[in-house]
Amino acid sequence: MMCEDQSTQSAAYDQDSFRRFHGGKVRCRGRSITVYIGKKLVVFGRFHPRWIAYLWVSMQKSVAPDTLVEYHLNRHQPEKLQFVLFDLREYLVDNDGKAGHAHTHSFYQIIWFKSGKGKHYVDFKEYKVIDNALFFIAKDQVHYFDGGCDYDGVLIHFNESFLVQHDDEVDFFLKCSLFNNPYQQPFCCIGRGIEPILDDYIRQMRLELGNPRSWGQDELLRAFLKAFLIQVQRKKNEFEEKQGKQPFVVDEKRLQLIEFINLIDVHYKKGLSVAEYAGKLHLSPRSLSDLTHQTLNKTPSLMIQERIILEAQRLLLHSNLNVSQIAYRLGFDDPSYFVKYFKKHAGVSPTEFRKSIH
């Protein structure tokens, strides 16, 4: 392999470049450069440092990332369609090595396992995959597939901006509760009988996607998606009623609760008080406390704390960030206070949690 002469670039400059690649785990000493990839790897200075950087990039799949991988759908490209539909089997084959690793995305995802048996992982829980299981993965939720590809099904990705257009659609999106409800399971089984209806919506979506950016395409796809979600929500309510469970029926209080949950998702790193959250909802702190107590038997403070702990656990489990880095990322100025906060609410220290999971 042809390599550039080392003299074309200083070692000190490339040490900084390495830090950008691997968080400072690089040492330059004399004519050699030591790159830490698991065990120590020494590459002598006769090879240009930039070439070593490329070497590291090619090996990074074997190294846990410093933070969770986040995927986006046409980010910063509003002119492109904010909706995409995949055949599940083809998607898993094409994304082998990615879908099976923990990740998040800034869009919403519907996974319909029409047939096949396996497991799916959402946050810290393992769920069985059975025929006609539907998973609803919200923005920023950590999930991954089991590594298998023997599934028939459909995968739908869409950005929030695609579905949420006006106030009435915001209401629907919140009422749907399939995505924006951390206090329900992220999946449901639709059983038999509804598949032809859902399949027809999928068929219509595919036909419309076959017409490249035709006039009114967004509106038609949005209508098919909303119809798909409405049918699933109806089936989910029916299934829960048969099991003797109380369906997540949306009324004014439930809608306010979901709005509060959404606000927590947006602001939990900012250290807002309960009074500040209440103000954003045009409620008094007492009214907000009554709301969360009546619907979930929890205080607003506890819900905020649970969201912070959830994100901390995600980062402890799925990233190589150290405890101090996680503390700063979550808005804590003092890492030692974060350790006390985490232990108080999780029952163990961050380090103990990480060891227990791994």
Image (tube, rainbow, N blue to C red):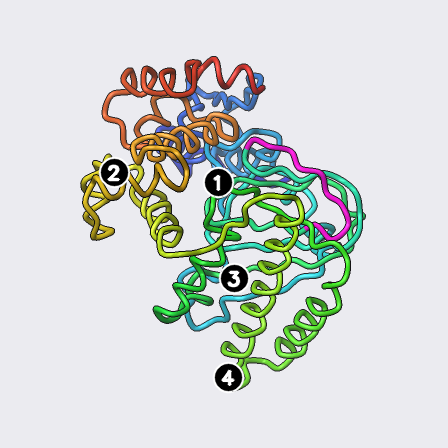
Tell me, yes or no, whether the two marked residues, 3 and 1, touch with CB atoms within 8 Å: no
- Sequence order check: which comes first, mark 4 or mark 1? 1
In percent of width and height, residue 25 lies at 44, 23
Q: Which residue is mark 1?
A: 183
Check disc 1: other Cα within 10 Å, few if <14, some if 14-19, many if 20+. few
Q: Which residue is mark 3?
A: 158
Check disc 3: other Cα within 10 Å, few if <14, some if 14-19, many if 20+. many
Q: Which residue is mark 4?
A: 216
Secondary structure beneath dot 2 equals: helix
Report the amino acid beneath label 1. Tyr
Q: Residue at x 58, y 17 (%)?
A: 39
The one of 168 and 203 positioned closer to us in this rendering: 168
Res 201 → quadrant = bottom right
| Cα–Cα gap, marks 3 and 2 | 27 Å
Q: Which residues are magenta?
A: 124-133
Secondary structure beneath dot 3 equals: strand
| On screen, residue 121 above or below 188 | above
| Cα–Cα gap, marks 3 and 1 | 22 Å
Q: Which residue is mark 2?
A: 270
